[in-house]
Image (tube, grey):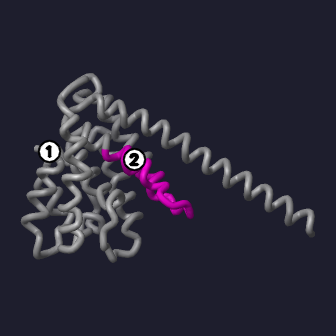
Amino acid sequence: MKLSQILSQLLVEYTDRPLPLSVVLKQVGNSGFGTIAGILTMPMLIPLPIPLPGFSALVGIGIILVGCQLALGYDKPYLPQRIARIELSPAASGKLLKNINRLLKPLEKMSRHRFPRFSNNEWGCRISGACLAWNALLMSLPLPIPLTNLAPAYTILFLAIGLLEFDGLFILIGYGMTMATTIFFASIAGTIWQLAYHWWQILILKS
């Protein structure tokens, strides 16, 4: 079942009450790695009225855990209770449901079962898990730069759809986006380091 279908069914069922992540885990079972990563990433791509403090950090930790478990060869994902208890409010669920057609379905129409060497292979899945964890870490960084979390979030979405649809091309695109995102964040880190060094030199000269 496609990620958009899983999300739509759950969100319609929980339109009048909060949707806990633990319910999603029970529903998806062994296909949960791609599904959980995709669901956790969606709020980072669509502005949602989520009042939970530290939500982005919890989302990042959840995807890091899921990615590490996939990289280590786990059969299905496990999330700590604090993360599994994360709930989408009815208002957030409604907004997410409206945006599924805009964001997910166009990508899913392009995906299909192909390149099984990358999509249905133990080492391919392990590498995908490592990429999920790495991008989630980058996405969670508290950088004072707008929209820096979008690049790793879209990378996670491509990897999640690739895992769920057994689409090796999407997974390969995810690998390429991981490299590009890493270079992008490395350039940001280099710029911050140069600015910090410049101001440090100014402070030393003044003293």
Instruction: Please provide percent x and percent y for residue 177.
Output: 43, 38
Q: Residue at x 22, y 28 (%)?
A: 120
The residue at which mark 1 appears reads as 2
Quadrant location, the C terminus: bottom right
Residue named by callout 2: 133
How far from the left and from the top, in percent, is residue 4? 16, 50
Amino acid type, label 2? Ala
Mark 1 vs mark 2: in front: 1
> Image point 41% across, 64% down: which residue?
57
Q: Nearer the viewer, residue 28 or 174?
A: 174
Magenta highlight on residue 140: yes
Give the quadrant of residue 99: bottom left
Element carrying mark 2: helix
Residue 79 is situated, as x and y percent measured from the top left of the image, at: 27, 58
- Numbered disc 1: secondary structure: loop
- For image coordinates 29% across by 29% down, the residue present is 169
Based on the picture, tell me whether residue 173 belongs to the magenta stretch: no
Stretch of the chain drawn in magenta: 136-157
